[in-house]
């Protein structure tokens, strides 16, 4: 959507940094600890992933790492705009 000022001139959108690549790589490499969730600002979801891994003494790490791998692949296969709108603006916390 285009925003115009009083004279009809286009006002550029101010966007925060797109964290797609960083979040995607962190999800694949450190998904077990939920680091990618913290980078995107999803503190509760990051804590859930971290606590499952730690409180189960690593037993819960396998399913959490699979979730991280899937999320990393999803993040990296989305276009920049689609990722930004879905995960940074829309705040979709899982998948």
Image: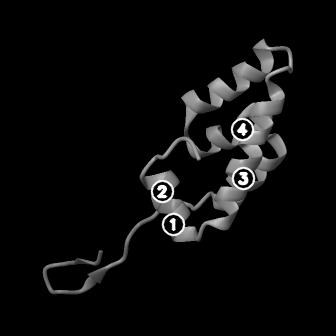
Q: Earlier in the sequence, mark 1 or mark 4?
A: 4
Label of residue 9 in the image: none
13 vs 41, left or right, is left
Q: CA distance from mark 2 to mark 1?
A: 6 Å
Callout 4: SS: helix
What colour scheme was applied to this rendering of the protein? one colour
The tally of labels here is 4
- State the residue at coordinates (77%, 32%): 63
Q: Quadrant of residue 78?
A: bottom right
Residue of label 3: 72
Relative to the observer, which residue lies in front, 72 or 40? 72
Is 48 rendered above or below residue 82? above
Callout 3: SS: helix
Q: Earlier in the sequence, mark 3 or mark 2?
A: 3
> Which percent across, then down, holds residue 61?
82, 28
Relative to the observer, which residue lies in front, 10 or 25? 25
Residue of label 2: 86
Q: Earlier in the sequence, mark 2 or mark 4?
A: 4
**Number of residues whose C-alpha sits closer than 10 Å to that of mark 3, classed few (under 14), some (14–19) or many (20 or more):** many
> Which percent across, then down, holds residue 69?
77, 47
Is 65 rendered above or below residue 7? above
Q: CA distance from mark 2 to mark 4?
A: 18 Å
- State the residue at coordinates (73%, 43%): 68
Is 80 rendered above or below residue 55? below
Residue of label 4: 35
Label of residue 82 in the image: 1
> Which percent across, then down, holds residue 6?
13, 80
């Amino acid at each position: 959507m285009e925003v115009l000022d009083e004279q009809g001139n286009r006002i550029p959108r101010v966007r925060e940094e797109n964290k797609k690549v960083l979040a995607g790589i962190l999800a694949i490499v450190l998904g077990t600890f939920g680091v990618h969730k913290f980078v995107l600002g999803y503190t509760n979801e990051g804590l859930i992933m971290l606590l499952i891994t730690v409180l189960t003494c690593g037993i819960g790490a396998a399913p959490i790492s699979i979730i991280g791998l899937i999320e990393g692949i999803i993040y990296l296969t989305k276009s920049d705009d689609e990722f930004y709108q879905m995960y940074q603006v829309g705040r979709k916390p899982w998948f």
